[in-house]
Image (cartoon, rainbow, N blue to C red):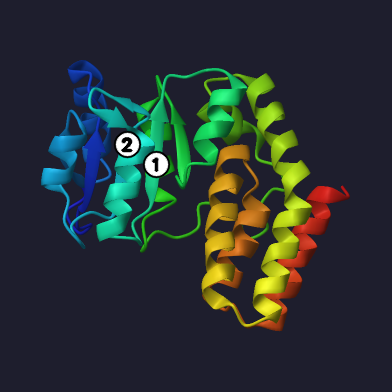
Amino acid sequence: MIADTPPVRLLLVEDDPISRAYLAHALEALPAIVDQAADVAAALALASPGRHQVWLLDANLPDGSGASLLARLRAQDPGVPALCHTAGDDAASLAAVAGQGFDGLIRKPVAPAALREAVRRHLPAAPLRVADQPLRWDDESATRALNGERAHVDALRKLFLDELPATRNRIRGAIAGGSVVEAETELHKLRASCGFVGAPRLDAAVRALQQEIGSPDALRSFEAAVDELLDP
């Protein structure tokens, strides 16, 4: 551990004891304190408002699903980022996870460095992990996150691009109508999708718009990042 870096606190929910030990050991090097649970009941017993900076939830648990657990956790602590970890390897399953409210997806097995990087992206005090001029598409990180399955990256990107115009229109409409909560909800979902498909430049623009949701400059940068993906 780095002496001058205070540890964050994470909730790790994984039913397989070997996988849970491996993931916890990798995360402790962030540095982090890792609260471990094997099922929904144990996770709910460990969770309390303000306790954890990130939740890492298995997609399938003995007494429920990761999505149902996420809904219950968010009911008591709505602002915490949540990552889903899964061994599922088909594009349809991965796309379904992307629509369940998670902020990111971790494919198992995952290398320790890739796991820590996925968590760092969602820590409040962490700097952006992209260059000053981020890539339009980050093929390397997206493919690594999906265990080298480039076909899955391509499939998820197609779904992402098909939905992107409608997402932009909803964000435009919410901002123009003064519906801040609706705009924040849409931006939050879009950031999660950017993480799934490896779109760091759009992710950076969405972050900037989240921080200054009424800023014309931030909105123009967001629009430009969307246009770049839709009309490369």
* Residue 61 picture location, percent across and down: 28, 26
Q: Are marks 1 and 2 in contact (CB under 8 Å)?
A: yes
Sequence-first tag of 1 and 2? 2
Residue at the extreme right: 231
- Residue at figure coordinates x 16%, y 34% from the top left: 37
Q: Is residue 107 above or below residue 99?
A: above
Front residue of this view, candidates 41 and 17: 41
Give the x, y percent position of residue 7. Answer: 20, 53
Q: Residue 153: image x %, image y %?
A: 65, 28
Q: For mark 1, give the secondary structure.
A: strand
Q: As rendered, which of 148 and 175 lies closer to the eye?
A: 175
Q: Is residue 97 visible?
A: yes
Residue shown at the point (32%, 36%) measured from the top left: 57
- Kindly identify the amino acid type of the residue bearing the numbered disc 2: Leu
Q: Is residue 69 placed above or below 151 in the rendered structure?
A: below
- Label 2 neighbourhood size at 10 Å, few (<14), some (14-19), many (20+)? many
Q: Circle 1 sits on which residue?
A: 83
Give the residue number, with chain letter if any, for mark 2: 57
Tell me where residue 101 appears, x and y as whole percent. 46, 47
Give the image quarter of residue 138: top right
Q: Residue at point 17% right, 44% down?
A: 44
Of helix, strand and loop, which one carries label 2? strand
Disc 1 crowd rating (10 Å Cα; few below 14, some 14-19, many 20+) is many
| On-image quarter of the N terminus | top left
Query: What's under tag 1, amino acid-wise?
Result: Leu
